[in-house]
């Protein structure tokens, strides 16, 4: 049995991040592997995904990495599953595995708003199903802006950082609603342009990530006073670095979810380690809505949700940044190639990157 240091942060609203935290020793038994399921169906015209992985038990075989074996505590992808999305009208759609543990439902499958959906997962003779959920009827909109600041950030008293803020128009609904915000980023990275006989520039490089993965903005319409239809929310903050030398996008999704999904994410928010991420394995068994059909007592982590989404994007350019940014990849004839960071030489050094321009890059 291992023990994790668990920090509980108290979030009063989406705007306020309470810096007072209590440290707790939390026991976690890793002797039994647990299935982790994350997936979402929504109203957007995009491919949908279900992510399957499992926790690592104490007696797990080590991984082979290059010339040696390694032990790590990260979840490992489940690659042997059959995954289906099913609705309450018995329409059944099969998902294809496009990467280890990543199963895709093509955008050609239309998600109906008048029926419920659940995921069905078959693994080595076991069948897992989520509770059916129907797409929420209402979602608000975001007017997204950014603000550059210099001050205390990550215990550094003098750091330049950016804040992503939204003036939210809340859903126009007489029924309770529940919101979560997901923020991701994408930026253009300037690879080093080494002189060559053909004057050929390096390939384009686009990098994707999450600017503030520890933050999990949530909002319950149950707490809104009559007549209130707007709110200002702090959605993300991150350090200003070399990624701001070129166009840097922040993609904001306002996600309208069910009451059960909201309760699940509220529990995850309470348990997220303040040095971890909502994309890491939960530090304690936060059960979601997926069950083993033959053994309901089996602990399954994660959640499969059906959501309504509104999406906005905003970007900055170098001219918007009021701070000096050093150019780490600039070519100099006196500088040996070994002195350049590897990310200046190859786009593939970034874990989530591509040479292909996103189709929406020049929409704004």
Image (cartoon, helix red, strand yellow):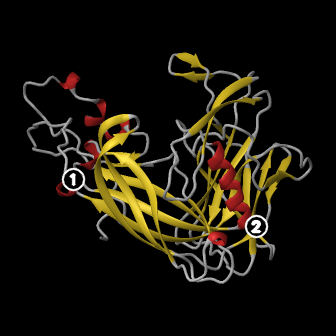
Mark 1 lies on residue: 321
Q: Residue at image x 67%, y 37%? A: 283
User: Tag on residue 28?
Assistant: none
Circle nearer the N terminus (2, 1): 2
Left or right relative to 65: residue 75: right
Q: What is the quadrant of the N terminus in the image? A: top right
Which quadrant holds residue 80?
top right
Q: What is the quadrant of the C terminus in the image? A: bottom left
Residue nearer the viewer, 315 or 354: 315
Q: Mark 2 packing: few (<14 Cα in 10 Å), some, or many (20+)? A: some
Q: Residue at image x 26%, y 42%? A: 242
Q: Position of residue 225 (x, y in %)?
A: 60, 76
Q: Position of residue 357 (x, y in %)?
A: 33, 58
Residue nearer the viewer, 194 or 15: 15
Q: Position of residue 163 (x, y in %)?
A: 37, 54
User: Is 48 rendered above or below residue 338?
Assistant: below
Mark 2 lies on residue: 86
Label 2 to label 1, Cα distance in Å? Answer: 47 Å
Q: Where is residue 121 in the image (x, y as percent from the top left)?
A: 77, 53
Left or right relative to 246: residue 256: right
User: Is 245 rendered above or below residue 44?
Assistant: above
């Amino acid at each position: 049995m291992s023990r994790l240091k668990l920090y509980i942060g108290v979030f009063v609203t989406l705007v306020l991040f309470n810096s007072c935290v209590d440290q707790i020793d939390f026991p976690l038994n890793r002797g039994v592997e647990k299935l982790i399921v994350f997936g979402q169906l929504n109203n957007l015209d995009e491919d949908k995904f279900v992510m399957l992985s499992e926790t690592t038990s104490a007696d797990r075989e080590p991984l082979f990495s290059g010339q040696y074996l390694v032990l790590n505590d990260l979840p490992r992808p489940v690659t042997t599953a059959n995954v289906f999305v099913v609705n309450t009208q018995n329409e059944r759609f099969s998902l294809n595995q496009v990467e280890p543990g990543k199963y895709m439902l093509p955008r050609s499958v239309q998600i109906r708003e008048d029926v419920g959906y659940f995921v069905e997962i078959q693994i080595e003779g076991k069948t897992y199903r989520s509770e059916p959920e129907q797409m929420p009827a209402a979602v608000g909109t975001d007017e997204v802006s950014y603000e550059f600041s210099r001050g205390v950030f990550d215990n550094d008293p003098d750091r330049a950082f950016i804040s992503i803020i939204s003036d939210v128009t809340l859903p126009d609904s007489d029924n309770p609603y529940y919101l979560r915000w997901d923020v991701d980023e994408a930026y253009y990275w300037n690879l080093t342009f080494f002189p060559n006989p053909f004057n050929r520039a390096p390939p384009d490089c686009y990098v994707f990530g999450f600017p503030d993965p520890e933050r999990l903005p949530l909002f319950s319409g149950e707490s809104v006073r009559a007549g209130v239809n707007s709110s200002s929310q702090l959605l993300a903050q991150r350090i200003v670095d070399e990624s701001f030398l070129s166009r840097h996008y922040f993609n904001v999704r306002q996600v309208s979810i069910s009451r059960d999904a909201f309760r699940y994410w509220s529990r995850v928010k309470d348990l997220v380690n303040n040095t971890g991420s909502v994309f890491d394995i939960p530090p304690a068994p936060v059960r979601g809505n997926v069950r083993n059909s033959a053994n309901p007592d089996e602990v399954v982590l994660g959640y499969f949700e059906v959501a309504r989404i509104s999406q906005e994007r905003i970007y900055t350019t170098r001219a918007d940044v009021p701070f000096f940014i050093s150019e780490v990849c600039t070519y100099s004839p006196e500088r040996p190639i070994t002195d350049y960071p590897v990310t200046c030489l190859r786009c593939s050094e970034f874990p989530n990157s591509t040479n292909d321009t996103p189709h929406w890059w020049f929409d704004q």
